[in-house]
Amino acid sequence: MSDIFTGAGDREIVAEAKKAGERVTAEIGKVIVGQKGVVELLLISLFSRGHGLFIGVPGLAKTLLIHTLADALDLGFGRIQFTPDLMPSDITGTEILEEDHATGRRAFKFVRGPIFTNILLADEINRTSPKTQAALLQAMQEYKVSAGGADHPLSRPFLVYATQNPIEQEGTYPLPEAQLDRFMFSIAVGYPDEAEELEIVRKTTSGAQARVEKVLGPREIEVFQEAVLKMPVADSALRYAVEVVRATRPGEGAPAEVNEWIQWGAGPRAAQHLVLGAKARALLAGRYAAGPEDVRALVAPVLGHRIVMNFKAEAKGVLAGEILALLAQKVPVV
């Protein structure tokens, strides 16, 4: 294991990262009631440069959560409401013919779309066609947009947070597997408990509006993101991440439950995201290295959207989360 985090400067970064996470969480808590696990995953994705897909029924404050995160960060923010008639150029931008009135010469000029921001909220991403969904692919992976024969780089940090409603199927387009794989996390946003729901109703019907302060800027975020890359990870955690991902693939030697219920397993990017997420989780907790417990905590959100259940599982109502919970405990840490 590397000793990169043993210096005084490294210890200071770890301490500052923990404080920064607490400050952002406190600002989000002024608006969002509960959802502690969702907020934690949101911060892990921020610190590890990972995109997030938030899945939940209407009214669970998915959009408000991402809006509030943007309010707490001194970053550019853009929102795209995905609709069936949305075109790729509505996301990336388009070229227009512009005339110089002094010379009379005409030339094409690229007008940037809403994707040129730091945090992009892709609201109800499954309501638009695959062609338009694909317009996000290059930007999410390569941090640039190609148009008019030229590449237009995106500002860093750049993160896409998408929302999706799981109960409405009419007029929706399931995300292609290639695009799902670009999301670091698939985050299930569940119903609040009774006490939280009571507090939500009280807050939202009182007329009072909480003021969210900006507590983190782009330079600080980049420092923490670089710290995540440099943070050491235990060899046992690295092996565990790879073994869990490999265990999701049906075939000879795979667990019996996998061969029975899973059609396709996760690819190598899943293991990369498990390790990066584990490092960010450790950093936010004020620790100097990531261990197997950090990897295990992220198995469901990292792998849930990367495995394809077979027809038998769908007919029997067997969920991906059930199999992943089993694998997380079954795969040994060595």
Image (cartoon, helix red, strand yellow):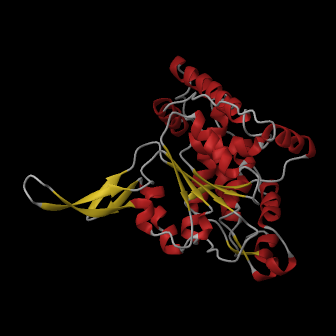
* Farthest residue, direction right: 194
Q: Report the quarter where the N terminus lies.
A: top right
Left or right: 175 as drawn, with respect to 321:
left
Regarding residue 293, the answer to whether it shows in the image is yes
Picture quadrant of residue 183: bottom right
Task: Please name whichever residue, 210 or 320, is drawn nearer the observer in this view of the structure.
Answer: 210
| Residue displayed at 49% across by 70% down | 132
> What residue lies at 80% left-to-right and 78% top-to-bottom?
314
* Residue 220 x/y as whole percent: 50, 29
Looking at the image, the residue that sits furthest to the left is: 103
**Which of the two residues, 148 or 304, is positioned nearer the viewer here?**
148
**Is 89 located above or below residue 210 in the figure?**
below
Q: Is 258 situated left or right of 2 in this image?
A: right
Q: Quadrant of residue 206?
A: top right
The foreground one among 120 and 15 is 120
Counting the numbered discs, the total is: 0
Q: From this viewpoint, is residue 235 visible?
A: no
Horizontal relation, residue 225 to residue 275: left or right: left
Residue at position x 45%, y 47% in the image:
117
